[in-house]
Image (cartoon, rainbow, N blue to C red):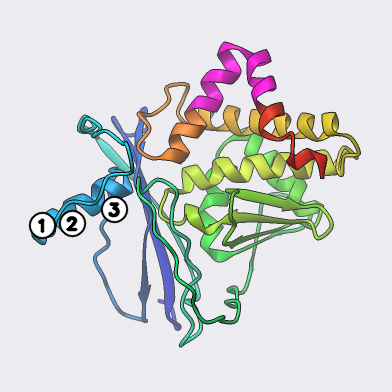
Amino acid sequence: PCAEPLRAALSAVLYDAPGGRPLATTNTTSVTLVPGETQPARVSAESRRDRLSAERAEQGMPPLPMAPQASPTPPKPPIVAGWVAPLLSAGPPPPEGQREERQFPFDLGFEFEAGAGAARPAPTPPAEVCLDVAARGCLHVDPRLRQTVEVLRGVEMGASLLAEAADFGVTVRRAALFGNLGQYENRSRTITIAASLDELSDWERAAVLAHELQHVHDHLRGLLPTSTQSECVARERAAFGREARFWRELWQGQLPDARDSVQDSLNRSVSEAEDDPQAYARSLARLYRHQCDR
């Protein structure tokens, strides 16, 4: 039993049968538990917008507003699962009086207008855990990403990338990022996974981590930092390629029916890279043209 309170995060993967084909991932639900306490935790394979809409309907509230010029989307078919594999991470809760750093996900389908607020100090990140990833050293990881690392370790390419990162002294943390789902800082050897991924599953977070670990791999080989736009684009192409191969392998080659914008983006990366690699490379070059000019 735990002697201190813990912040636990639960998601799951739905399969057609034990050890069978994955069908869908759920959202992540987080709860703070004190020693000896038990709390129910509900996870769902529906999109965030669908979950919010269902909750509002149960409470007799009006429907969520539609995005400008958006048309209603048909409901997703129900998922008939024969087995559920839970994914659980736990770590110290935020210090008393400090709100956990949060970030709205990108797939709500409508926008909030943020008002001016008083400045507040940056939240203190939880103490890192040092995970054994079968390397000479351990990998320093935000405890909220412990299960994300375990998902990556379950795939051969992920295990080797994690061991490489541990021996290179990389730290994996979680924080708010604006415009990116992940980021690698080569000077500090730090990977940041966006807080906007908090409500998705560890599979989506692991795919983003695979992308950033490819940057670590390139850094080790002397390919980062880059000095030209073409080199920069080439490194991003390698990272997106790694992310797409990892995502495809997780789903055993049968991509899911996308239930959020991140899954949709990952699915498109796989299909576009396989269907027309040259067109995909040109698309990435356009996407990163300005960023790679810096």
Q: Do the residues labelled 1 and 2 touch (CB within 8 Å)?
A: yes
Q: How crowded is mark 2: few (under 14 residues within 10 Å), some or many (20 or more)?
A: few
- Disc 3 element: loop
Say above or below: 204 vs 21.
Answer: below
Residue displayed at 51% across by 54% down:
147
Badge number at residue 58: 1
CA gap between label 1 and label 2 equals: 5 Å
Q: Which amino acid does label 2 sit on?
A: Glu
Residue displayed at 81% across by 38% down:
218
Q: Which amino acid does label 3 sit on?
A: Val
- Disc 2 element: helix
Please give the residue where the numbered disc 3 appears in the rendered image: 43
Q: Give the range drawn in magenta.
A: 268-283
Badge number at residue 55: 2
Residue 62 falls in which quadrant of the image?
bottom left
Q: Residues within 10 Å of mark 1 (few under 14, many from 20)?
A: few
Q: Which amino acid does label 1 sit on?
A: Glu
